[in-house]
Amino acid sequence: MYGYIHSIETMGTVDGPGLRYVVFTSGCPLRCKYCHNPDTWDIKNGKKMSIDEILNDYAEYKPYLKNGGITVSGGDPLVQIDFVTKLFEEAKKRDIHTCLDTSGTSFSFKNQNRLEKFKKLAKFTDLVMLDIKHIDSIQYKTLTGGNLQETLEFLDFLSKEETYCDVWIRHVIVKGYTYKTEYLYKLGYYLGSYKNVKALDVLPYHDMAVNKYAELGLKYPLAGMEAMPKDNAKKARKIIEAGISDRIQNKTAQYS
Ligand code: SF4
């Protein structure tokens, strides 16, 4: 089976536990305003690679990838769910830790065919890094063009016994969009009811992709927006954690 691959990073340090072999797949249905990889959007821009090619290449780096494994990121890997499932199935046969980095886009409990595919994928996935881009559904649509419900249903799916996966949450803070006390707290309060959420990564918006957009002839959606200071990520994290803590202690939410 073949997949369409944007690129491979052999020593990833921020895409899951340990040092990781990171496969960036092509194709993404979202159009996040802060996306720094617009060159991954179109699946056709990817290089066709087989599962054997990827796993043989991984084997070359295996001695260096202590406590790590394979992470599939994107784009959004769920665009190529059959390929990722097969890759993870083969990886598990070789006892490789598997991590899926996604926004959960395209998940639905209602679509039975699709649900079966997700169940199969969950069987071979050790960890999901779930990017929740906004906790307000209207703002989510504005920021990404997508549907928040898909992300939240995916988190729910991963919390069920049959399809359980540990989840690390990722959240990017952007001025005027996600960097607001109310939204951050609400996100935390929502997450507080999920026992499979094991870690939280709050990332400050950066504007390093501006030149990439220019090279691709694309208009940069957040033109003029300043990069978010790292300290603000720490502040945001504290607010999210306050929401999580209130939820765990069954306190009434500070925002409805
Ligand atoms: S999900 Fe990721 S790759 Fe897709 S548009 Fe958003 S930031 Fe870009």
Image (cartoon, grey):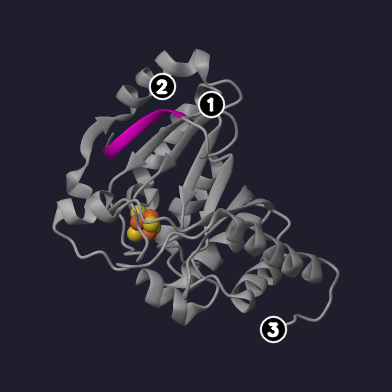
* Main secondary-structure element of the magenta-colored stretch: strand
The relative height of residue 165 versus residue 50 in the rendered view (above or below) is below
- Which residue is the site of mark 1? 96
Considering depth in this image, is 255 or 81 the residue closer to the camera? 255
In the image, the residue with mark 2 has its CB under 8 Å from the nearest atom of ligand 1: no
- Which residue is the site of mark 3? 255
Residue pushed farthest left? 217
Q: Quadrant of residue 187?
A: bottom right
Q: Residues within 10 Å of mark 1 (few under 14, many from 20)?
A: some
Q: CA distance from mark 2 to mark 1?
A: 10 Å
Q: CA distance from mark 2 to mark 3?
A: 47 Å
Q: Amino acid at mark 1?
A: Ile
Do the residues bearing badges 2 and 1 touch, measured as CB atoms within 8 Å?
Answer: yes
Mark in front: 2 vs 3: 3
Which segment is the magenta one? 4-11
Label 1 element class:
loop
Image position of 123 (left or right of 209): right
Label 2 element class:
helix
From the top left corner, tell me how far across and down residue 245 is, in percent.
Answer: 79, 65
Ligand 1 positioned in quadrant = bottom left
Image position of 108 (left or right of 246): left
- Label placed on residue 58: 2
Mark in front: 3 vs 1: 3
Q: Residues within 10 Å of mark 3 (few under 14, many from 20)?
A: few
Q: CA distance from mark 3 to mark 1?
A: 42 Å
Residue under the point 24% across and 52% down: 211
- Quadrant placement of the C terminus: bottom right
Image position of 149 (left or right of 37): right
Q: Amino acid at mark 2?
A: Tyr
**Mark 2 vs 1, N-terminal side:** 2
Mark in front: 2 vs 1: 2
